[in-house]
Amino acid sequence: MYDHRRLGRELGLFGSDPLIGSGLPYWLPDGATVRHTLEEYVRDAERRAGYQHVYSPVLGKRELYELSGHWSHYNEDMFPPMDLGGEQVVLRPSLCPHHAVIYRSRAHSYRELPLRMAELGGMYRAELSGVLGGLSRVRAIQLNDAHIFCTLDQAADEAQAALGMIRRAYEALGIRPSRYRLSLPGPGGKYVAAPEMWERSTTLLAEVLDRSGLPYEEGEGEAAFYGPKIDVQVADSAGRESTLSTVQIDFHQPERFDLHYIGPDGARHRPVMVHRSVIGSVERAVAHLIEEHGGAFPAWFAPTQLVILPISDSEVAAAEAVAERCARLGLRARLAGPERGSLGARIREDRRVPYQAVIGAKEAADGHVALRLRDGRRLDPRPADAALRRIGALVGAHRTELWECGEVGIW
Ligand SMILES: [Zn+2]
């Protein structure tokens, strides 16, 4: 595996500057393209799964986090509060309290449940500068988060569906989890005291893992302060494990925020909150994807999907026509002309690009391209339109294969 910090700079994906500060990377255009594509994939998957998206501010009053319990249990990881005209505001350490308040902003009937609220939003963690580097540990985090407000009877199914979403996303992204972990409280940690609640949510999560048929280990001392969680672990280039995705069942925050819904009996009932994240923080996900793929990303989220290589100046016009067709199809293509060196040198330079379309005199005359795939395969010249439509279909289906269409019946 590769070190994402070195490769990320080499590929021009992100950078940092001491003047902005450590743990505060910026995204360069190719990195921003990868990130947009990833965020759009997640939003789309969530829309299809019945989630509704919201936006909420990255700041909140200190009282919000006192109510959620972050202030007493999670204070060390939070930035110090800012004094503002007699009140204190805090950079949020999680999105849950805002979503609980949004849920509370109007009455809900049991018919609306499960209510799935999602947001790709900013949050902050006061990491010490010594542990920062690249994208895997940052102070400003963009989190793919969601909270499902549901009845107790619905909680296990919702958690299981969330786990299914995570597994589908990993397949499309080419991520291999290193293990699944049932994260439990441990000695000495700051946890909310409610033994019965912990027991109930732990049993539910263990059932979800068993039903999914996934092997897992228990991790003591790895729970959130308000409850146990299922963590999907990945390993980095140095073999260090970190959590990318999580599913949690929470009885604590609905209680703290006095959330309720009106049941079929006309009475008020307390919902359960399922917290879940498909790809975790966008920063950590991209760091992992860089290492997992060595910068050779699956075509659907590669910054450049196709490079067009006219052999000589005579084929540049034909190459430009292919580039235009790519733009119309929504493919991210780039033309690398003869002024950039010999064909061999240009092929080597763009070796991480999934597709290379070589255009010589014969191809230009016939409206063809000769495709080279990143894995070394060279395909016979074929009509440019058909080749681009097939690439477009593979990209649209989030396939990791470069040419095989397989059972999705694209072709
Ligand atoms: Zn949450």
Image: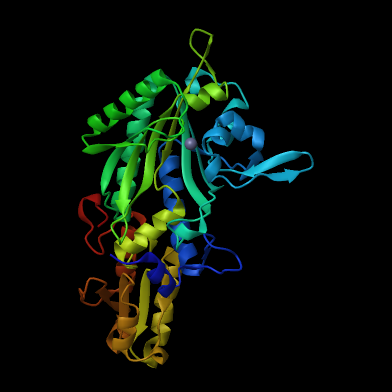
**Quadrant of the image containing the N terminus:** bottom left
Looking at the image, can residue 390 be seen?
no
- Residue 203 relative to residue 274: left or right: left
Farthest top residue? 265
Looking at the image, can residue 231 be seen?
yes
Which of 386/36 is in front?
36
- Residue 119 relative to residue 385: left or right: right
Q: Residue at x 63, y 33 (%)?
A: 64
Q: Residue at x 51, y 55 (%)?
A: 128
Farthest right residue? 85
Q: Position of residue 65 (x, y in %)?
A: 60, 34
Q: Residue at x 22, y 71 (%)?
A: 375
Q: Residue at x 31, y 82 (%)?
A: 347
The quadrant holding residue 258 is: top right
Q: Position of residue 296 (x, y in %)?
A: 32, 67
The quadrant holding residue 18 is: bottom right
